[in-house]
């Protein structure tokens, strides 16, 4: 083998598989580490009374901005939870609203550019 070239077959068979393949797999699949049971985590938080159900937040959002829901995220911030909603109005304006997930208080309302 020429100097400066890496023989991937010999690396693979010498036990370098995981350290070599892990970064490659992470680049190929950017959602590694995310689970398919996020909805179960949210359900547990609602059942424990830690956060409000999404239905209550959606009703509250209509008091501030009417529109069709595009996206919802539940984020952890400063030890608490935030519902982040993205809505589009009939005029085509996209709004992002952030609600405290524990009490439904509107924290931020921003028109997307």
Image (tube, rainbow, N blue to C red):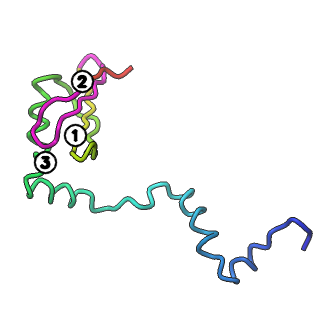
Q: Earlier in the sequence, mark 1 or mark 2?
A: 1
Number of callouts in the render? 3
Q: Which residues are magenta?
A: 90-109
Q: Mark 3 touching mark 2, by CB under 8 A?
A: no
Q: For this view, does 19 lie left or right of residue 92?
A: right
**Separation (CA) of disc 3 from disc 2:** 20 Å
Q: Judge the density around disc 3: few (<14), some (14-19), many (≥20) Cα neighbours within 10 Å.
A: many
Which of 64/3 is in front? Answer: 3
Q: Secondary structure at mark 1?
A: strand
- The residue sitting at 17% across, 22% down in the picture is 65
Q: Earlier in the sequence, mark 3 or mark 2?
A: 3
- The residue sitting at 11% across, 53% down in the picture is 46
Q: Quadrant of the C terminus?
A: top left
Measured as percent of width and height from the top left, residue 1 is found at 90, 74
Q: Which residue is mark 3?
A: 51
- List the single residue furthest toward the bottom: 14
Q: Mark 3 touching mark 1, by CB under 8 A?
A: yes
Determine which of the numbered discs, if any, sits on residue 109 in the image. 2
In this view, 12 is above or below 96: below
Q: Earlier in the sequence, mark 3 or mark 1?
A: 3
**Separation (CA) of disc 3 from disc 1:** 9 Å
* Picture quadrant of residue 88: top left
Measured as percent of width and height from the top left, residue 39 is found at 23, 57
In this view, 85 is above or below 16: above
Residue 74 in magenta? Answer: no
- List the single residue furthest toward the front: 78
Q: Secondary structure at mark 3?
A: loop
Q: Which residue is mark 1?
A: 83
Determine which of the numbered discs, if any, sits on residue 113 in the image. none
- The residue sitting at 66% across, 77% down in the picture is 16
Measured as percent of width and height from the top left, residue 71 is found at 28, 38
């Amino acid at each position: 083998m020429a100097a400066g070239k890496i023989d991937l077959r010999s690396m693979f068979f010498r036990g370098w598989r995981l350290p070599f393949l892990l970064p490659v797999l992470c680049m190929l699949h950017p959602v590694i580490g995310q689970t398919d049971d996020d909805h179960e985590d949210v359900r547990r938080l609602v059942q424990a009374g830690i956060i409000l159900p999404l239905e209550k937040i959606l009703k509250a959002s209509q008091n501030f901005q009417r529109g069709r829901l595009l996206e919802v995220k539940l984020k952890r911030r400063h030890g608490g939870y935030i519902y982040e909603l993205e809505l589009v109005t009939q005029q085509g304006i996209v709004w992002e609203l952030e609600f405290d997930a524990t009490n439904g208080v509107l924290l931020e309302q921003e028109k997307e550019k």
